Image (cartoon, rainbow, N blue to C red):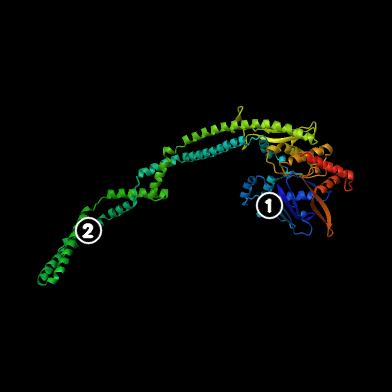
């Protein structure tokens, strides 16, 4: 519900704050008083492009702010959260229009974009008289209105769940198939690489071990020569370390026999002699084990080259090549065969398509029944509102497309998120004319009445926003005007209705009556809005009956109209 509208420095309005209530709010005033300015201000809140000409002359900027209390705020939560705006019990929409051409938007005191403002406005307010805010003129809204009226949303949700699951399975199949194709493309390469690495029989640390062996074999003669020389120096030569040390031991032994203090030195010499003997034996054993094997050296060199080629080819060391081989083995494992998984997914998709088709056909059948009921009710309502020869119809179509998901009567149809139906409301208001899309109806007043008829019929089963009607009384009078007024009053019992009118029959129906007046202030024209009490309300209805110079009889007639309106509920 719109609870308050604040306007400052906008067109003829210097500053005003208008409080709105539930029920039917009627706005009246003389031509040029500024009734359309209120609608223009609301349009700014609803996100239309700003016009700097609307900024009051001499002012830097115009400000329009609306406070609304939505009945179902959860419908707005996704829009607010996406924009990073905290939801609340109230929605405050604010628009600032600079005289220099800049425009700023605020939602709940948080800066926002014009796009977000428009999204919220479309969910909160349905303003008639300006085509861009007439939701029912947009075919994309017709399907949801039809489903809401027929209470088909549970069936729609069942369809949507299957539709989403089908999309999910298709994506999974696409992923699995892509992976299968990728593996198939590299299958030969993987098998070749695995075979090559497997034949190499790679072992961790092997390359370093081979490099050490090659060094030993390449230096076999040097090693043998060094061992021979060491053996002579240590033991074999007449002047070897062992011979000389043995002589030193004998002399130390004689010396320690004379002086016991040399006994420790004798023991050191004996130990050194043993070490020399042990070292000589180790050199001799090592020398005996030296292998002069050119063939073995060639084999080692060949193996070393094999490993080097593999490292260079694959761009990774031996240890990583061993892990790479294991990875290839896993990829080539029969467990990775996607054929079975692919077939299982295809079967699931076929089953989902069958289920989806059944739900789509059932949903379409229910929509056809609902459409027939709506067509009769709206045509009847249009007759009451002064369009007696109207023909309202709902066109439900499907699009045949080979390879699509919906299968019915051996044909394939495109599947959409809400079924396989395309829905559009059509209308003919004159005898002999074929029904046309609502957007092609030219008369603003006629459109408003069509919308009023539709909303009167759809109101019980749909969640419609605040309804604002401008020029709804264009081209009507008498009994038709009375019917329009009664229809507005009836609709206002479940929706907040705001309507500008020039007709007393409609004005008399008001629960709340606002009068727009134009005055002079400091030699400048200023528009103001005044909320009327019961007496002023009757007087304003009398003005519509007979002009400003109303008579006693016009006041009585106005009072009678108001009383009759009260009796109408």
Callout 1 touching callout 2 (CB < 8 Å): no
In this orientation, does residue 188 appear?
A: yes
**Residue at the location (48% across, 39% down)?**
180
Question: Relative to residue 77, is residue 52 drawn left or right?
Answer: right
Outermost residue to the top: 409
Q: How many marks?
A: 2
Residue 148 drawn at (x, y percent): 66, 37
CA distance for labels 1 and 2 = 100 Å
Regarding mark 1 in the picture, which secondary structure is present there? strand
Question: Relative to residue 330, is residue 265 drawn left or right?
Answer: left
* Quadrant of image for the C terminus: top right
**Residue at the location (31% across, 52% down)?**
209
Residue 13 drawn at (x, y percent): 78, 54
Name the residue beneath numbered marker 1: 92
Depth check, front residue: 411 or 155: 155
Residue 125 drawn at (x, y percent): 71, 45
Question: Relative to residue 539, is residue 414 drawn left or right?
Answer: left
Regarding mark 2 in the picture, which secondary structure is present there? helix
* 109 w.r.t. 487: above or below: below
The disc placed on residue 227 is: 2
* 553 w.r.t. 384: above or below: below
Depth check, front residue: 386 or 289: 386
In this orientation, does residue 415 appear?
A: no
Give the mark, 1 or 2, whose residue is nearer the N terminus.
1
* Circle 1 Cα neighbour tier, 10 Å, few/some/many (<14 / 14–19 / ≥20): many
Please identify the quarter of the rendering in which residue 352 is found.
Answer: top right
* 245 w.r.t. 216: above or below: below
Nearer to us: label 1 or label 2: 1
Residue 60 drawn at (x, y percent): 75, 59
The disc placed on residue 322 is: none
């Amino acid at each position: 519900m719109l609870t308050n509208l604040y306007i400052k420095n906008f067109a003829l309005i210097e500053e005003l704050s208008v409080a709105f209530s539930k029920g039917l709010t009627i706005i009246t005033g003389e031509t040029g008083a500024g009734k359309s300015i209120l609608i223009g201000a609301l349009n700014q809140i609803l996100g239309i492009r700003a016009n700097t000409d609307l900024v009051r002359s001499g002012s830097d900027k115009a400000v329009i702010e609306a406070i609304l209390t939505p009945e179902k705020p959860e419908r707005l939560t996704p829009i607010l959260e996406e924009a990073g705006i905290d939801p609340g019990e109230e929605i405050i929409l604010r628009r600032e229009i600079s005289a220099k051409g800049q425009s700023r938007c605020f939602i709940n005191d948080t800066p926002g974009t014009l796009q977000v403002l428009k999204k919220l406005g479309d969910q909160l307010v349905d303003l008639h008289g300006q085509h861009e805010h007439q939701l029912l003129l947009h075919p994309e809204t017709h399907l949801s209105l039809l489903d809401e009226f027929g209470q088909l949303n549970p069936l729609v949700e069942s369809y949507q769940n299957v539709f989403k699951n089908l999309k999910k399975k298709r994506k999974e199949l696409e992923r699995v198939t892509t992976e299968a194709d990728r593996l198939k493309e590299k299958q030969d390469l993987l098998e070749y690489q695995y075979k090559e690495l497997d034949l190499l029989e790679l072992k961790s640390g092997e390359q370093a071990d081979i490099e050490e062996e090659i060094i030993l074999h390449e230096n076999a003669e040097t090693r043998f020569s060094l061992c021979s020389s060491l053996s002579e120096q240590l033991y074999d030569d007449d002047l070897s370390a062992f011979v000389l040390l043995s002589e030193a031991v004998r002399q130390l032994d004689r010396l320690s026999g004379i002086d016991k203090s040399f006994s420790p030195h004798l023991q050191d010499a004996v130990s050194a002699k043993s070490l020399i003997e042990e070292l000589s034996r180790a050199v001799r054993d090592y020398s005996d084990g030296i292998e002069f094997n050119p063939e073995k050296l060639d084999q080692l060199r060949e193996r070393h080259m094999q490993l080097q080629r593999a490292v260079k080819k694959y761009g990774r060391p031996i240890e990583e090549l061993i892990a790479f081989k294991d990875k290839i083995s896993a990829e080539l494992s029969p467990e990775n065969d996607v054929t079975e998984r692919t077939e299982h997914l295809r079967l699931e998709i076929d089953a989902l398509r069958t289920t989806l088709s059944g739900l789509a056909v059932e949903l379409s059948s229910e929509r056809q029944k609902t459409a027939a009921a709506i067509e009769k009710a709206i045509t009847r309502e249009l007759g009451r509102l002064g369009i007696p020869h109207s023909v309202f119809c709902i066109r439900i179509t499907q699009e045949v497309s080979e390879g699509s998901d919906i299968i019915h009567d051996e044909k394939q149809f495109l599947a959409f998120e809400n079924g396989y139906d395309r829905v559009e409301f059509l209308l003919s208001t004159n005898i002999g004319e074929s029904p046309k899309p609502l957007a092609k109806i030219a008369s603003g007043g006629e459109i408003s009445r069509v919308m009023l008829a539709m909303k009167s019929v759809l109101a019980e089963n749909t969640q419609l926003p605040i309804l604002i009607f401008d020029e709804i009384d264009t081209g009507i009078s008498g009994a038709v005007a009375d019917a329009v007024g009664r229809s507005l009053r009836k609709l206002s019992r479940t929706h907040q209705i705001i309507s500008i009118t020039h007709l007393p029959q409609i004005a008399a129906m008001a629960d709340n009556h606002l009068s727009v007046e134009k005055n002079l202030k400091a030699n400048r024209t200023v528009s103001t809005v005044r909320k009327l009490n019961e007496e002023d309300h009757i007087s304003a209805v009398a003005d519509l009956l007979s002009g400003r110079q109303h008579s006693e009889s016009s006041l009585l007639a106005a009072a009678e109209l108001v009383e009759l309106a009260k009796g109408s509920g």
